[in-house]
Amino acid sequence: MDFTACTERAQELRALGILVTRKGEEILEWYAEPECRRNVYSASKSFTSAAVGFAVQEGLLSLDEPLLDAFAGEGPENPDAHLQKAVVRDLLTMHLGQVAPSLMGEQRIHMQEDDWVRYSLAQPFSEDPGEKFLYNNVGPYLAGVLVQRRAGCNLQDYLYPRLFKPLGIRKPTWEMDPVGYTFGAGGLFLGITELHKFGLLYLAGGAWEGKQLLRASWIEESTRDYRDSGYGYLFWRGKYDSYRADGKYGQFCIVLPEKESVITVVSECRDTRSLIHLLYDEICAKL
């Protein structure tokens, strides 16, 4: 299977590496430069989704827990009816009900607040949770904080024995908020082979080298299309019944269960729409 034209076009779009595994066999490994750890931006959210999955299976939290109970005493003094209806699940689906996105990359650097939990819960809620899709860093950030509080450690330490170590991934660097919580909405640094292993774990239904790490039922639930929004629990949905971890500037880990394949890309792409179309049309279509 010849992917030469695809990799040439990908390089024009400033892709730095592409890995493709089909039915357990690596069929494409291409690099524009040697592998190193890079910011995978919002692909970090999918690792936070996994952390929530581990916390659920360990009984540390419930997706049906009211948000104001999970963050008792940190919400507004007089929370509106929309916020009162929110539950932990709403942190994962981009259906939180807030009026505008917060904690985005261009916003965080200029924020004066140190307590991002109170800040996040104080932002206006204009819709009932579950009703309207709005891409927003508040949900994954709060989900990550909740896991950290219930587990008593940061996300790197929590995921290390459960995910990173079994996959052979050294403990990574991850952005923190001003008070020291791992920022579950972005800022995780990984190499392309490390990101690819994450996709392979999900393709295998949470099993790795004969051991079930993450429940298959969680992977199925978290990667399902939520209310036809094209989004699951911090995973995007795509063509060929695929789902993906998706980060700014073209950090993609695409899982295609029906094709038994994973495609991972790291890049410095400014035209990510063209890059994702290239991957689906020139690689996915041929698998």
Image (spheres, helix red, strand yellow):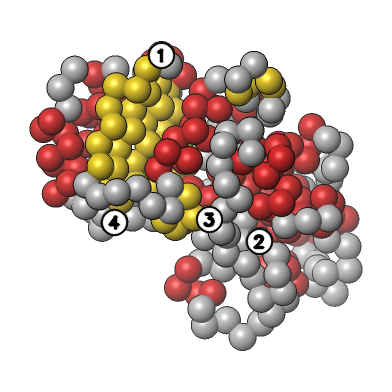
Local secondary structure at mark 2: loop
Please tell me which residue lies in front, 283 or 70: 283
Residue corresponding to mark 1 = 23
Give the number of the disc on residue 188: 3
Please tell me which residue lies in front, 198 or 69: 198
Residue corresponding to mark 4 = 268
Please tell me which residue lies in front, 127 or 77: 77
Give the number of the disc on residue 182: 2
User: Is 16 displayed left or right of 97 in the figure?
Assistant: left
Name which residue type carries label 2. Answer: Thr
Name which residue type carries label 4. Answer: Glu
Name which residue type carries label 3. Answer: Leu
N-terminal of the two: label 1 or label 3?
1
CB-based contact (under 8 Å), mark 4 and mark 2 = no
N-terminal of the two: label 3 or label 2?
2
Mark-to-mark CA distance, 4 and 3: 16 Å
Mark-to-mark CA distance, 1 and 4: 28 Å
User: Is 17 displayed left or right of 104 in the figure?
Assistant: left
Instruction: Specify the quadrant that holds the C terminus.
Output: top left
Residue drawn at 66 percent across, 61 percent down: 182
Q: Position of residue 207 (x, y in %)?
A: 62, 21
